[in-house]
Amino acid sequence: MTLSVRNLTISRGGLPLLECVSIDVPAGEALILRGPNGVGKTSLLRTLAGLQEAEAGEIDADPDELLYASHADGVKSQLTVVENLTFWAEVYGQTVPEEVYEHFELADLKSRLAGTLSAGQKRRLGLARLGVINRKVLLLDEPTVSLDQVSVKRFASFLQTTHLAAGGSALIATHIDLGLDAPTYDLSQNIAAPTPLDQDEAFL
Amino acid sequence: MKALLLRDLRLAIRAGGGLGLGLAFFLIVIVLVPFGVGPERELLSAIAPGVLWVAALLASLLSLDRIFALDFEDGALALLATSPLPLEGAALIKAAAHWITTGLPLTIVAPLLGFLLNLETTAYSFLWISLLIGTPALSVIGTFGAALTVGLKRGGLLLSLLVLPLYVPTLIFGAEVVRRGADGLNATTPMLLLAGITAVAFALLPFASAAVLRVNLR
Amino acid sequence: MSVWEYANPRRFMGWTAPVLLWVFGLAGVALVTGLIWGYFFTPDAARFGSTVKIIYIHVPAAFIAINAWIMMLIASLIWLVRRHHVSALAAKAAAPIGLVMTVIGLATGAIWGQPMWGTYWAWDPRLTSFLILFLFYIGYISLWAAIEDGDTAADLTSWLCLVGSVFALLSRYAVLFWNQGLHQGASLSLDAEENVADVFWFPLVLCIVGFVLLFIALVLLRTRTEIRLRRAQALERRMARN
């Protein structure tokens, strides 16, 4: 098991959001997170990435194997495509493999400033970071926003053939059908009962 | 670490304005002072050390809110926080990038502006050295202020309010060095104390900055 | 039972309710006696004339102004380490009191300074230090006011208080270096040589005790208000969920 979550309770802005979330993502597999807007998909992924603290529960994963991608992907308009990717590669102590440009259809755009790219191209650049940083467990938050159908397919095939096939795994929050052969997990079943949190409880 | 520094410098240069703006502000403040206090050479010469230091300090304040704001908005800061790079290191690098784009250019042009204020000839080397030692502290302290206010909608004014009192010791010792230089006195003591303040700022503030960044990223 | 139990908000509300009255009462007694004693039953000082009597306000206010910040520093540390909400709220509650005491200290100093030094304001190290302290209080209070989420605000202001304390200390020594000043030595040090004379000393100590008790009472009162505000918020949140 590369990512295992037991009875996780998380909150946002002092309100309990999700409770008893238990998820297993084995090596080589993906899991699709579903649920209506505001249910807590982003908060769950941020918690797993270590950006916020869980109220209760256990997360079993190697922090050095996790890679988080938010829907804001930190692409810098004033840097070229190559510079954007090289930066992240260097932060993770790696180099940019050439095939990444092919996978994400960026080969023709390499020396363009990211600011001159279309929304979809920018998004592909943001996602290309995942191919640059070689990590086992991907935590993806709405990875396909502003991608057209062809690009969605290509991204799904990148996940399937390059990442999952090599024994990686992924936890993906999305509203659309990626066409991946992966189970789904509906977070609606974990919506927290309206009990006060520890933080509030002391005051009630 | 090097990658982040290079990226920030590249961004500062390409974004335009950032680099020149602080310098232009520095120049304008120095030009305005004689209009305010009158053109007497002795008076200008007497207040030059303090005015140069205060103007440099205000100029370095201008670009503070950009240290983290852009990275916070486009998500890069959250991605950096989950990367192998320690956030303390990132805060230090951000301060270094800020210094290279504001403190260093200010230091270089300060002697030129000293002419405008009729600064004593003996004081130029002291002005230069005191700014070289003191402005890094301004950047590190400012980075802490920027980290504190990064999550706020209109943090700019609050940032100045929080950071300026923290600048007091640096300003006092920095201007004292130049004043003593101008009077032909021995400036070793304030110089060492100025370096001491900078050392304290470098030793403590990256940790505090990283801690408040984590709070703001929650 | 651990002493920290008293920091649970509900317990805190319980034990402070009766204590508060007593502290206010004692503060009133000490202040009324101290001030009346000081103003009407001490002789005019040879060097200062009757202006000396302002020390019964000036010195205690200045004393509280500094110690309120130290209390905030300790409370901030307790919040960062042990995460007791009452501690963070107490620091928040103390700040405006410290600010007011700083202003009182500066104002009475200015009023006294005019007959003594012939000026309302001088860049004397102690005056300057208090002015800087005033700026620190303003920054701290503004940061609390600017952040909506209670716990985030508590965290950020605590860090500001920590860093601010280090730099306030550095500023204090920087200011001493910058200008040697004209303030008289400590009015209350244990070193009898530079102490004020006994006739002035006893009512002064009584006034300081009164100010300390008043400070404690006000902090308790304001902390109770903050706790009630947080409780109201928590209840509102719960209603919104139901």
Image (tube, coloured by chain):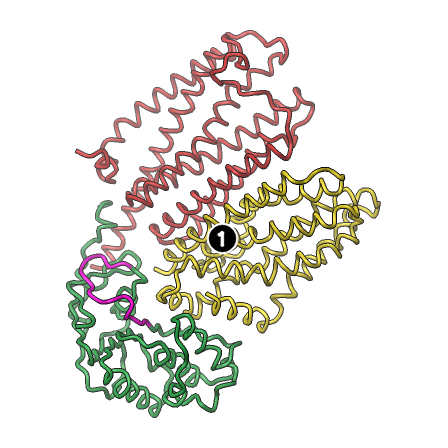
Front residue of B25/B143: it is B143
The mark tally for this picture is 1
User: Neighbour class for label 1 at 10 Å: few (<14), some, many (≥20)?
Assistant: many
Quarter of the figure with residue A65: bottom left
The percent position of residue B150, horizontal first and vertical second, equals 45, 59
Q: Nearer the viewer, residue C189 or C156?
A: C189
Tell me residue A10's x, y (percent).
23, 61
Left or right: residue C14 versus residue A74 is left
Q: Is B189 on the left or on the right of C63, as rendered?
A: right
Picture quarter containing residue A8? bottom left
**In the rendered image of this protein, which colour is used for chain B?**
yellow
The residue positioned 68% from the left and 57% from the top of the image is: B26
As shown in the figure, which amino acid type bears the numbered disc 1? Gly
Question: Is the C terminus of chain B in the top left, top right, bottom left or bottom right quadrant?
Answer: bottom left
Instruction: Give the residues in magenta.
Output: A53-68
Q: Secondary structure at mark 1?
A: helix
Question: Residue furthest toward the right?
Answer: B40
Quarter location, residue B61: bottom right
Q: Chain of mark 1?
A: B
Q: Is residue A163 left or right of residue A106?
A: left
Rendered view: C150 above or below C135: below
Residue C62 among those drawn in magenta? no
Q: Which chain is red?
A: C
Please give the residue where the numbered disc 1 appears in the rendered image: B145
**Figure check: A63 above or below A94:** above
The answer to whether A138 appears left or right of A88 in the picture is left
Q: Say above or below: C109 vs C160.
A: above
Image x and y of residue C151, in percent: 33, 50
Q: Give yes or no for residue A64 being in the magenta stretch.
A: yes
Instruction: Say which residue appears at 36% left-offset and 29% top-offset.
Output: C216
Q: Colour of chain A?
A: green
